[in-house]
Image: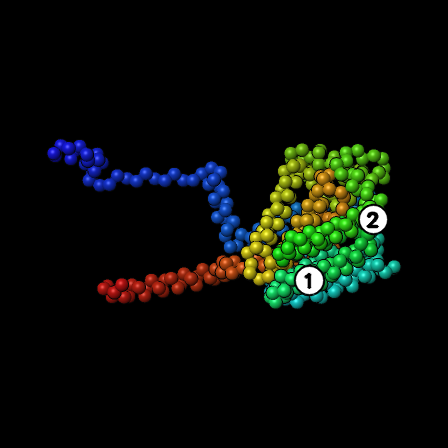
């Protein structure tokens, strides 16, 4: 009997009398482990806040570098100093940074209060554009106002911001009154107001900006939870109007013929810009020819520092540079979606959704045209292309996203813990608690 019992004992227990050591768990590694760590990092309260700041500033900074590189030859062609366009863009970026900081510190109530003044001011300036002697035409589009000297203003860029703030405030007030379940309240007066802006823009012939404004309208309706039938109905009406405007313009029809074009034709050919944009991207390779070494910007590629700056980026920085720009826009867009989906404030949700739709749609349309996948719409790459009128409202809109991201309850608490002096105060409270515990009698818990 004892022998049987002795034979059934575990060797480790017989030798040491203790339990067998537990087998250590293997640390997660590989793709699954990296995904888990990335997911946990993204779920942190301040992730969207820092992603918006980082992506917005990186896009703007890289855009300044590329504007300087892409515009030097154009400036010399007009007998200007090589840094002429860069200086103007840098000055606009400084003003835009101030607007971003102001917008990021403003409370939501003040953002809502600014909606109507911004929209009214944009409409007033867009009406002035159509008055002869005040409005100024660029590349056939009557959508600029001269401010004297080299400075010009494009009011339609501020119309985008005005539509987002006004539409978000309008939909938020109707949701508070539980009126968005009725299709009339969802459409009126939002859709007529947007169509009024579209009409003023189309009077100047700017089809590209009209497309962006229509995308913002659809983004607001989508975020507000418009029924599929209503959404499809508005999209059908807008699409029919767009087709009519395209069919009645030979210039717009020619832009569709240039999708995927690789033959530039002769001087003044309609597909010259599209073909040379493809040439620039194709000659960049993996890592590009180096900053300042672009060949296409020497006159072959029109608008190298504005609408087709992405092509120069591909030629000088290669596939690595273009993918980096795409990744930054993707991160900014995804962070905006997170802000819109993680808030309980309807105004914040609608405004964040509108801003994200604006920046994402405009980036897709610009890059798609450079890649030859979409017709050339003549819209700049947000935060990246040359143009102060486009940069200022866009940076203010990024400031809106930052303000909304920092006002989430979890983000507020995390930011409060990181304020200067908070750690010292917390350490003093912890030390005082430890002293009080030591002074208690030994029998007291």
Q: Nearer the viewer, residue 387 or 289?
A: 387
Say which quadrant the N terminus sits in: top left
Q: Which mark is residue 139?
A: 2
Residue 186 in the image: state x and y as whole percent.
67, 61
Q: Which quarter of the picture shows residue 322?
A: top right
Tell me if residue 39 comes above or below residue 108 in the rendering: above
Q: Which of the two discs, 1 and 2, labels the residue nearer the N terminus?
A: 2
Q: Which mark is residue 29?
A: none
Residue 115 in the image: state x and y as whole percent.
68, 64
Residue indicated by mark 1: 184
Measuring 48% from the left and 60% from the top, which residue is drawn there?
417
Residue 382 in the image: state x and y as whole percent.
69, 50
177 relative to 300 in the view: left or right: left
Q: Residues within 10 Å of mark 2 (few under 14, many from 20)?
A: few
Q: Nearer the viewer, residue 111 or 350?
A: 350
Distance from the alpha carbon under mark 1 to that under mark 2: 39 Å
């Amino acid at each position: 009997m004892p022998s049987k019992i002795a034979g059934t004992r575990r060797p480790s227990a017989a030798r040491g009398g203790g339990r067998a050591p537990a087998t250590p768990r293997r640390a997660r590694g590989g793709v699954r482990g990296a995904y888990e760590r990335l997911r946990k990092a993204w779920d942190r309260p301040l992730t969207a806040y820092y992603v918006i700041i980082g992506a917005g500033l990186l896009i703007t900074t890289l855009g300044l570098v590329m504007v300087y590189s892409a515009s030097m030859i154009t400036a010399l062609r007009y007998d200007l100093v090589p840094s002429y366009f860069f200086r103007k863009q840098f000055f606009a970026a400084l003003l835009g940074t101030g607007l971003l900081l102001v917008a990021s510190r403003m409370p939501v109530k003040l953002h809502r209060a600014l909606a109507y003044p911004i929209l009214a001011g944009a409409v007033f300036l867009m009406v002035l554009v159509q008055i002869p002697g005040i409005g100024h035409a660029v590349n056939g589009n009557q959508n600029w106002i001269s401010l004297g000297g080299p400075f010009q203003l494009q009011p339609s860029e501020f119309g985008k911001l005005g539509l987002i703030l006004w539409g978000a405030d309008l939909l938020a007030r109707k949701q508070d009154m539980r009126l968005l379940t009725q299709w009339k309240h969802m459409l009126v007066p939002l859709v007529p107001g947007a169509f009024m802006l579209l009409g003023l823009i189309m009077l100047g012939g700017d089809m590209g900006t009209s497309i962006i404004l229509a995308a913002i309208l659809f983004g607001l309706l989508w975020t507000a939870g418009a029924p599929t039938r209503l959404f499809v109905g508005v999209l059908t009406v807008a699409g029919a109007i767009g087709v009519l405007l395209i069919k009645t313009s030979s210039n717009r029809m020619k832009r569709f013929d240039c999708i995927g074009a690789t033959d530039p034709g002769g001087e003044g050919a309609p597909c010259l810009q599209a073909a040379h944009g493809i040439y620039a991207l194709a000659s960049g390779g993996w890592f590009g020819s180096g900053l300042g070494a672009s060949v296409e910007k020497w006159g072959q590629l029109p608008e190298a520092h504005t609408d087709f700056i992405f092509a120069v980026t591909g030629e000088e920085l290669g596939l690595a540079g273009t993918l980096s720009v795409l990744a930054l826009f993707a991160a900014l867009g995804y962070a905006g979606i997170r802000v819109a989906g993680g808030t309980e404030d309807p105004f914040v949700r609608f405004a964040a959704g509108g801003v994200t739709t604006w920046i994402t749609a405009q980036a897709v349309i610009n890059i798609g045209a450079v890649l030859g996948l979409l017709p050339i719409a003549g819209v700049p790459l947000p935060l990246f292309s040359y143009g102060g009128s486009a940069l200022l409202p866009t940076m203010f809109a990024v400031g809106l996203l930052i303000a909304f991201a920092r006002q989430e309850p979890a983000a507020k608490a995390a930011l409060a813990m990181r304020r200067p002096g908070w750690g010292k105060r917390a350490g003093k409270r912890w030390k005082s608690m430890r002293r009080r515990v030591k002074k208690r009698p030994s029998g007291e818990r």
